[in-house]
Image (cartoon, grey):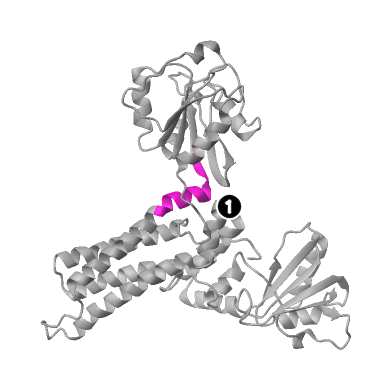
């Protein structure tokens, strides 16, 4: 258990130490070693030998680059390098910083890193550079988290969302909401200062109710965007389901353009869930091939079928494959298990003559769409991809889009929504100002947790930044 004194010492160490880490992976043509902290320039200057014998890096101007040699503390040469110099507050962290660019050999980078540590720097922890940027006011907490999302972005959609958050568009939304809440809270609390004059009302209750409703509507919209944002970030789940030997694994292989799943004429070949990702129009979809659904006495196969149902529950889009007319029982099962999901019914094996004339009757069930395909012959697969993308109903995204992608943000918005709804309820019941003010303060605090505007615990900060890569 970390004591209050221990937490203070850790924070003091975080601010006053000079840290160093590799900012690039080894193996490239160029590698970068990054230092940040009060002695970053001094440590680098002690290891740097300029081609100009009269040059001192300590006296160099901010925003300049310098060519020379890097040596260790024994004076042994490590490599030819270029040093970039930044002075506080005009750096990523807001501190004095240097970046040593050398050859990308793993050996050279480790020697450069060890030289800096021997000279007095400390190995940076995960996310410590970005944590310092947050602590030094270079960005708020939601922007800091966007840095990790930007590094992890693997398609255009997640890149645009992370870029929007890093640029402060989400923070701007929250700031606007908090400014309105602060104004409302100030008026209500002003009444409390004149509680002995009950006839005084600084905050018109109808105006307050209208403002609170607007804030509630916006918080609700932001919170609801999390479902799409989280799906875009992790990959929109698409479950491939159907009876045994209907062609699910063949379809998976065609969509992925590789033999990812075993294909066999034997029923029950797929006994576990197989997952992989497919990129359609720069959006990641998480394809889930499931065990064939049937009654079986095989214990292992039954486990696979149960997992198939679990993945079906998680899916946003369902590819329900059939190769014959569904029985009323099968149709009822399809309706029940896919309620609220976009269902694309795939009539497979149209390359087989008897399947081409099969008539399908869904009664009252209306799937999102129905396609005739041949997974084996690659017929209709390109059209299917377009339907999968359309079924996802992805909003038009750009670097100004505000969509919640972080579970911590969603939780805080949910708590803020509860608080503002208590305010609305209190206004309807004509509750006293002190009760309204308490719920308003709670709402302010919950929104502040997202950007770090409220008092954020060290435990929360550690949990956020420990998931960053070292060097960021």
Q: Is residue 29 magenta?
A: no
Nearer-the-camera pick, 65 or 464 = 65
Above-or-below relation of 40 to 373: below
Name the side, left or right, on which 190 lies relative to 303: left
**In the image as oriented, which residue stretches furthest toward the left?**
199
SS majority, magenta:
helix
Q: Which residue is mark 1?
A: 156
Figure check: 355 above or below 56: above
Is residue 467 visible to us here?
no
The x, y position of residue 132, in whole percent, is 58, 74
Q: How many marks?
A: 1
Instruction: Return the x and y of residue 361 as percentages of the image width and height.
Output: 37, 19
Viewport quadrant of the C terminus: bottom right
Residue 384 place in picture, x, y as percent = 53, 32
- Please indicate whether residue 471 sits to the left or right of residue 32 in the image: left
- Residue lying at 83% horizontally and 86% vertically, measured from the top left: 55
The reply to whether residue 141 is visible in this rendering is yes
Q: Residue at x 62, y 35 (%)?
A: 256
- Would you place residue 145 above or below residue 6 in this image? above
Residue 454 vs residue 298: left or right? left
Residue at 46% in and 42% down: 392
Hey, which quadrant is residue 375 in on the image? top right
Q: Give the residues in magenta.
A: 225-237
The answer to whether residue 146 is above or below residue 14 is above
The residue lying at 47 percent from left, 57 percent from top is: 406
- The image quadrant that residue 78 belongs to is bottom right
Q: Is residue 79 left or right of residue 153?
A: right
Q: Secondary structure at mark 1?
A: helix
Q: Residues within 10 Å of mark 1 (few under 14, many from 20)?
A: some
């Amino acid at each position: 258990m970390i004591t209050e004194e221990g937490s203070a010492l850790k924070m003091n160490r975080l601010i006053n130490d000079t840290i160093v880490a590799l900012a690039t992976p080894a193996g490239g043509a160029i590698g970068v070693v990054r230092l940040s902290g009060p002695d970053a320039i001094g440590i680098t200057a002690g290891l740097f030998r300029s081609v100009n014998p009269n040059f001192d890096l300590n006296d160099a101007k901010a925003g300049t680059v310098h060519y020379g040699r890097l040596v260790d503390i024994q004076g042994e040469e490590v490599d030819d390098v270029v040093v970039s110099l930044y002075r506080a507050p005009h750096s990523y962290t807001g501190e004095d910083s240097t970046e040593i660019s050398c050859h990308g050999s793993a050996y050279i980078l480790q020697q450069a890193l060890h030289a800096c540590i021997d000279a007095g720097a400390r190995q940076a922890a995960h996310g410590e550079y970005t944590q310092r940027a947050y602590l030094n006011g270079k960005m708020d907490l939601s922007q800091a988290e966007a840095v990790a999302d930007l590094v992890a972005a693997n398609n255009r959609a997640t890149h645009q969302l992370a870029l929007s958050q890093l640029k402060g568009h989400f923070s701007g939304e929250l700031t606007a909401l908090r400014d309105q809440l602060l104004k409302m809270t100030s008026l209500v609390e002003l009444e409390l200062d004149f509680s002995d004059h009950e006839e005084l009302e600084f905050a018109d209750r109808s105006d307050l109710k209208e403002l609170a409703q607007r804030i509630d509507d916006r918080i609700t919209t932001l919170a609801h965007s999390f479902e799409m944002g989280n799906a875009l970030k992790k990959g929109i789940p698409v479950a491939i389901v159907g009876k045994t030997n209907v062609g699910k694994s063949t379809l998976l292989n065609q969509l992925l353009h590789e033999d990812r799943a075993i294909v066999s004429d034997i029923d029950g070949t797929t006994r576990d869930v197989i997952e992989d990702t497919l990129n359609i129009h720069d959006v990641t979809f998480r394809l889930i091939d499931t065990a064939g659904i049937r009654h079986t006495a095989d214990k292992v196969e039954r486990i696979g079928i149960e997992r198939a149902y679990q993945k079906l529950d998680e899916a946003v889009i369902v590819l329900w494959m059939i190769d014959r007319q569904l029985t009323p029982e099968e149709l009822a099962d399809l309706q029940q298990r896919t309620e609220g999901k976009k269902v694309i019914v795939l009539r497979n094996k149209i390359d087989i003559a008897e399947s081409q004339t099969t008539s399908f009757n869904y009664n009252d069930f209306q799937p999102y769409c129905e396609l005739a395909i041949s997974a084996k012959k690659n017929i209709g697969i390109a059209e299917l991809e377009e339907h999968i993308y359309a079924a996802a109903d992805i909003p038009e995204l750009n670097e100004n889009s505000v969509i919640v992608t972080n579970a911590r943000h969603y939780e805080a918005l949910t708590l803020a929504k509860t608080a503002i709804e208590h305010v609305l309820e209190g206004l309807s019941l004509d509750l006293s100002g002190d009760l309204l003010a308490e719920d308003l303060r709670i709402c302010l605090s919950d929104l502040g947790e997202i950007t770090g505007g409220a008092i954020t615990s060290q435990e929360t900060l550690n949990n956020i930044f420990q998931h960053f890569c070292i060097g960021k």
